[in-house]
Image (cartoon, rainbow, N blue to C red):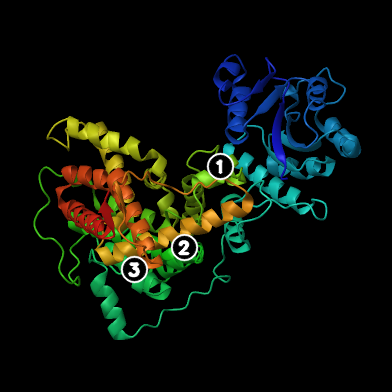
Amino acid sequence: MPAVYHACYLDYRVRSPASLTADVLMSAIAREHTLVAHNLTQIVSVFKQATSHSSTAACLEHLATVDPATQVVLFIDMPSRDPALNHVPKDALHGPTLLQRIRSTSSSLPNRLFPVALVDDEEAEMASYVELGAIDVIHRIMQEPRIRGILVQLYRDTCRILPHGTYKAGWICGSMSTSIGPDEERLVESLFHVMFFDQTPSADALVVTPLLLAHERAAYLQSIIGDWDFPANKLTDDELTQCAYYIFQHSFTMPEVQHLVLSPDDLQHFISVLRASYQSRNPYHNFRHVVDVLQATFSFLLSIQVLPPYTRSTPPQHEGVVSASSLARILDPVDALVLLVTAIGHDIGHPGVTNAFLIASRSPLARLYNDRSVLESFHCAAFNQILARYWPIMQEKSIKDLIVDAVLATDMALHFDYMRKLDNILLDGAVLVTDDQTENARRKRLLCSTLIKCADISNVARRLDISTHWGTALTHEFKKMSDLEERLGMETSAPTQPDSSTRRPAKVLSQEEKETVALAKSQLFFINAFAEPLFEAVQLVVPELRYTADQISNNKHTWEKRLAELSEVT
């Protein structure tokens, strides 16, 4: 079993020692010193529970009651470097003396204690406190990312020292006795190095070689990147990489984004780093999927004319002017480029399982993000760290906020929240772009998030043969997850749909026919429950995207017909 972590905060400024969870945090810190209130808020955002103490004696008394299997992270406020600010505690054990006692008596303590020193100057005080036994030294004004980094490193180090034969928990499967697989685990762990320890791939570690494509093939790729019938399922990863390159190069032609563009070499390197950050063994959530989402976003932006026309497309894109009633008028070229960036990074490091699986398996990923938008939060954190190294201007606050909002919007658990927001805009009347700049900014953020949501599930809006490929790939990925859940003794968390059909097979179906029936039912469920209402709502605020809703309607009728052909009314 992996360790369970508990946080203790020891600071003489604590006025009301308490046991804290997110539910009681605000009331518990209402009367606390400002620094204490801030630090406890940061701690509880990472740990599900924590305790605060003003004296060492009370803290140690509490630790004696904690389950011995629990690993305790003890945050200790150390003496200030300014003698005038030093407080002399009543305890004989305090600060450096407490660290020495923990180190000398660790074998006899009921819990494994991992002390963290809180100081004024990390660099100047690091060596002395580490020498005394602190596992880390951080600024006394604590910050959530720094705390998460400690937890990540602690988890990994704890797993390394487990006794022989004891299960080493994985990032994905948590407390279960079987890991999802070494490749997936290594990918997630490597991305945590990116997120917390700034160990992104160096230019030397990732050799980017120019893609050597025949002229005819390169011309073909350039001709299809603007088409809605983009056949991502028929392209190699090298060709998908080149398609992504062409899409970004076209967006770079806008004068308004020249301060944001990458050089051709840097762009190729950036795309290659992202390609390496996706799990190729996933049937669905892989590099092919994100390039498909990138191309769908590109198509949307061409259709609403926030990108320059792409003249190599065959057939040409929809022509005309953006409707005066279209919310798309609120977007600008910078928004367009940021949406393309978001699209290619929105699923980075996806392990091929769902949020429901991660939560049910007590995965450390789920625990890090408090069971809320687990994968989406992970994608955001990892992607932004990669951007910080390979495209740092994309970390400017307004740009980063848009990226984070749009990636988090892809959590299908939030789908109906976004539907309500779109409905509220429609209820406001015919004027979609208002004179209220604050309201326009809110609507712009909503539209950007909604376009990424649409692109993410756009496979059901593609031509039927392309849509069928994606539906089959997703079915295979859910089957892999279900097989893993069976091995782990878990209940299945794969999405299921109610079977309200009144039909039964007219004959004994072949295996291929059974698979067609299952796929048709899953596609119809997803279209009816999610995709059709979303795309219909979107085309009401962005009429230029009507073609997507029309294709969904056509696909729906075809799936219904196929299902009817394999069934009979009872």
- The amino acid at mark 1 is Ile
Q: Earlier in the sequence, mark 1 or mark 3?
A: 3
- The amino acid at mark 2 is Leu
Side of 493 relative to 238 (left or right):
right
Mark 3 to mark 2 CA distance (whole Å): 17 Å
* Residue 87 placement (x, y as % from top left): 76, 20
* Residue 492 placement (x, y as % from top left): 52, 47
Q: Residue at x 57, y 66 (%)?
A: 202
Side of 18 relative to 538 (left or right):
right
**Mark 1 sits on what residue?**
359
**Mark 3 sits on what residue?**
232
Side of 230 relative to 80 (left or right):
left
Q: Along the line of sight, which residue is nearer the eye, 537 or 391?
A: 537
Q: Residue at x 73, y 45 (%)?
A: 1
The kind of secondary structure element at disc 2 is helix
**Mark 2 sits on what residue?**
274
Q: Residue at x 78, y 52 (%)?
A: 166
- Residue 228 is tagged as none
Q: Along the line of sight, which residue is nearer the eye, 475 or 236?
A: 475
Q: From the viewer's perspective, is residue 380 above or below residue 341?
A: above
Q: Is residue 305 visible?
A: no
Q: Residue at x 88, y 22 (%)?
A: 92
- The amino acid at mark 3 is Ala
Mark 2 to mark 1 CA distance (whole Å): 26 Å
* Residue 78 placement (x, y as % from top left): 75, 30
Q: From the viewer's perspective, is residue 112 above or below residue 152?
A: above
